[in-house]
Image: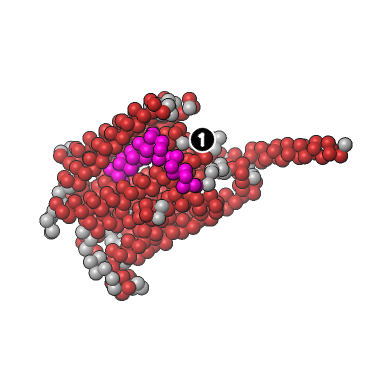
């Protein structure tokens, strides 16, 4: 019968196509260990450049005061403007939507280009070229006279950088899943975070050295901007491999399909009590880490009377510590669980470190490594825990939502830290007293600790199994 023949033929065709896809999957680029790890290091370079630029001016706070007249509030404003697009334009959420629509290559290129443009504008805003009546100087002088034209141009640059940076983190996470799903995925995520932290560590160590260059202090800002621009070029190399892989394997077998973002999803997320507690922990914990980190080198300089190079080196101990500890805790969480407990310990250690900084003179070298311990415990336990409480299809929306809430803290607390510093230190004080600023960070640690306790208690009711090993849920 012709219809029976047609049926058998189409079954054979489907089976054959499936077999061919599996075959292609077996022999695709992602099956070469060397190629997929090379891809990880390629996009890891982009991530390192991202984190480098985010932290590049942190050890230069006093240089910005001396050269550009920034006070602590200006510096806080500069740090925080990174988060404005992610909080107020919900870029961390819409970036995910754009990623679903345009795909990895176009979204990645577009957002890394924003990062590069923003980084170059920031460096330009600090440069002599701009300050000697360069392009845009007259315009930036024509409004809001309370803020210098240098600050305004640098704010615009960092705003654009922030617009690209958070979404590029989401793109890179998706790239890792694309190449490592069903392979060494957890390890790949650990290495990715390690590469990001390498960027932070290098920024803290290199920037204070680069300001002593013969060509002037702005070498440090230009270097950071060129690092990000190089990352854009490096991403072009990645795009070639990505295209090749897509040609080898049907795209649908590679990229895990997530449901498109819907605002109604937010309703589901914010009625999940475990998710609320983990998001609030994310907000408070990261607000006590990244904004503190931005001020840390200046804090050590003022409290312990160190040079910019020495204080940058001490601050760099924290990312160095995380590079060591994060993979260890990641492995621990996979194998033994205890994620909720680790988040409690991490928040407690964070609070102790900040209180020690506020009220004692214990050597900051040791305390920064201990802070690195806390900053490994919580991220290593937090991000995989979200995957346990949220359906895989909505994980992108969940992370996007968490990033937006987290950025609220990354926006508000650097400004608050700067305002507290300016408010508690008379103008022209030789060395700044950070006590009240550190009390603020300790307070955030305590609130985070409470959310971590609530999360663990809630886990007993909701049964997400945060205390269980990865494969048992
Ligand atoms: N799968 C999510 C990993 C997030 C890692 C996390 N980064 C962030 O939370 C960013 N939203 C903020 C980065 C700001 C500084 N560059 C981290 O622990 O770094």
Q: Is residue 445 above or below residue 214?
A: above
Side of 413 relative to 223 (left or right): left
What coloring was used for the rendering?
secondary structure
Residue 232 is one of the magenta-drawn residues: no
The residue that label 1 is drawn on is 184
Does residue 171 appear anywhere in the picture? Answer: no
Spot occupied by residue 268 in the image (x, y as percentages of width and height): 45, 39
Which secondary structure, mark 1?
A: loop
Could you say where residue 433 lies in the image, as x and y percent from the top left? 15, 49
| In the foreground, 317 or 420 | 420
Badge 1: few (under 14), some or many (20 or more) residues near its Cα, within 10 Å?
Answer: few
Left or right placement of residue 251 versus residue 294 in this view: right
**Residue 448 place in picture, x, y as percent:** 29, 37
Which residues lie in the magenta part?
A: 261-290
Left or right position of 376 against 436? right
Q: Nearer the viewer, residue 228 or 78?
A: 78
Q: Is residue 290 above or below residue 220?
A: above
Residue drawn at (21%, 56%), measured in percent from left and top?
72
Pick whichever, 125 or 451, lies toward us. Answer: 451
Give coordinates of residue 234: x percent, y percent: 49, 54
Secondary structure mostly seen in magenta is helix
- Residue depicted at 54% across the width and 38% down the height: 181
């Amino acid at each position: 019968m012709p219809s029976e023949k047609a049926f058998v033929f189409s079954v054979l065709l489907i089976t054959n196509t499936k077999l061919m896809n599996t075959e292609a999957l077996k022999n695709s680029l992602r099956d070469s260990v060397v190629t997929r790890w090379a891809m990880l290091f390629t996009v890891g370079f982009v991530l390192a450049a991202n984190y480098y630029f985010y932290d590049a001016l942190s050890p230069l706070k006093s240089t910005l005061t001396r050269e550009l007249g920034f006070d602590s509030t200006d510096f806080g404003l500069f740090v925080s403007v990174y988060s404005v697009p992610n909080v107020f334009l919900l870029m961390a959420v819409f970036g995910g939507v754009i990623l679903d629509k345009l795909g990895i290559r176009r979204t990645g290129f577009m957002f890394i280009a924003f990062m590069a443009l923003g980084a170059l504008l920031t460096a330009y805003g600090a440069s002599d070229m701009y300050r000697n009546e360069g392009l845009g100087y007259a315009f930036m002088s024509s409004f809001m006279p309370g803020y210098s034209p240098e600050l305004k141009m640098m704010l615009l640059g960092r705003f654009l950088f922030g617009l690209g940076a958070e979404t590029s983190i989401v793109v890179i996470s998706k790239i890792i899943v694309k190449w490592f799903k069903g392979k060494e995925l957890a390890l790949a995520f650990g290495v990715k975070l390690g590469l990001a932290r390498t960027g932070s560590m290098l920024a803290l160590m290199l920037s204070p050295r680069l300001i002593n260059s013969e060509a002037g202090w702005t070498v440090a800002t230009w270097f950071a901007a060129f690092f990000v621009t190089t990352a854009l070029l490096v991403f072009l190399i990645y795009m070639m491999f990505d295209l090749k892989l897509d040609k080898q394997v049907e795209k649908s077998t590679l990229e895990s399909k997530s449901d498109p973002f819907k605002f109604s999803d937010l309703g589901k997320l914010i009625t999940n009590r475990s998710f609320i507690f983990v998001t609030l922990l994310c907000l408070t914990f990261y607000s006590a880490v990244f904004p503190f980190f931005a001020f840390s080198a200046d804090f050590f300089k003022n409290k312990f009377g160190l040079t910019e190079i020495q204080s940058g080196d001490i601050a760099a101990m924290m990312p160095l510590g995380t590079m060591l500890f994060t993979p260890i805790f990641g492995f621990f969480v996979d194998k033994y669980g205890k994620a909720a407990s680790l988040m409690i310990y991490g928040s407690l250690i964070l609070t102790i470190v900040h209180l020690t900084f506020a009220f004692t003179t214990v050597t900051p070298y040791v305390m920064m490594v201990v802070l690195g311990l806390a900053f490994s415990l919580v991220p290593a336990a937090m991000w995989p825990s979200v995957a346990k409480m949220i359906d895989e299809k909505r994980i992108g929306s969940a992370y996007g939502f968490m990033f937006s809430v987290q950025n609220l803290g990354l926006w508000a607390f650097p400004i608050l830290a700067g305002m507290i510093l300016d408010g508690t230190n008379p103008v022209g004080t030789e060395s700044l007293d950070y006590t009240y600023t550190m009390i603020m960070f300790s307070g955030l640690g305590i609130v985070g600790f409470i959310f971590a306790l609530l999360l663990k208690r809630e886990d007993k009711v909701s049964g997400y199994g945060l205390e269980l090993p990865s494969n048992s849920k």
